Image (spheres, rainbow, N blue to C red):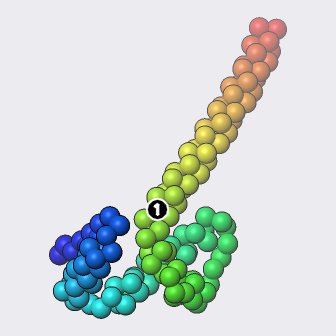
Amino acid sequence: MSTPAVTVYINGDSAQLGEELGKAIQAIRDAGGSVEQAATKFSMLEARGSVQLLASEFGVHVPREISRMVASIDGLGPVLQNMVGIMAAVWAITAIEKYITKMREAEAAVSEGFSKALEATTTRSDELRAVVSG
């Protein structure tokens, strides 16, 4: 189901502005709600998810009840709902960056371990040759 779009052009003519706003209000009503519902209707789940992702980014634990309260603040809920996609992308990029960092650390540790093992093997091999030839 597609969401109806409402476009309002403002050109300085107050009569035309009133007419365009009237069309916008009628379009919202035709879509099945009142102007007030359209302004306050948002997904609490997405808004709470955005609060949780934001808190996670800052390394802060936010209890479920607090995230629900923050998401329900007038005017903030719809903003948080719209941020959930952005926050998910930021979280994914951060997670990938942490993964890459950990993989590089593991690669360096494995490389260092192989170098030490090779050095120990070479030393032991040289000692063994000296004993056998000696």
How far across and down, in percent of the image, does residue 124 sit? 76, 23
Let me know if residue 3 appears in the view. no
Question: Which residue in the protein does label 1 denote?
Answer: 86
How far across and down, in percent of the image, does residue 87 sit? 50, 64
Question: Looking at the image, which is closer to me, 24 or 121?
Answer: 24
How far across and down, in percent of the image, does residue 88 sit? 47, 63
How far across and down, in percent of the image, does residue 54 sit? 58, 69
Q: Name the quarter where the C terminus is drawn.
A: top right
Residue plotted at (18% across, 86% down): 30
Let me know if residue 12 appears in the view. yes
Residue flagged by tag 1: what amino acid is it? Ile
Question: Looking at the image, which is closer to me, 61 or 8?
Answer: 8
**Residue 43 sits in quarter:** bottom left
**Residue 5 sits in quarter:** bottom left
Mark 1, residues whose alpha carbon is within 10 Å: few (<14), some, or many (≥20)?
some
Residue plotted at (48% across, 74% down): 79
> Which residue reaches farthest top?
133
Q: Secondary structure at mark 1?
A: helix
Residue 64 to residue 2: above or below: below
Residue plotted at (24% across, 78% down): 19
Q: Name the quarter where the N terminus is drawn.
A: bottom left
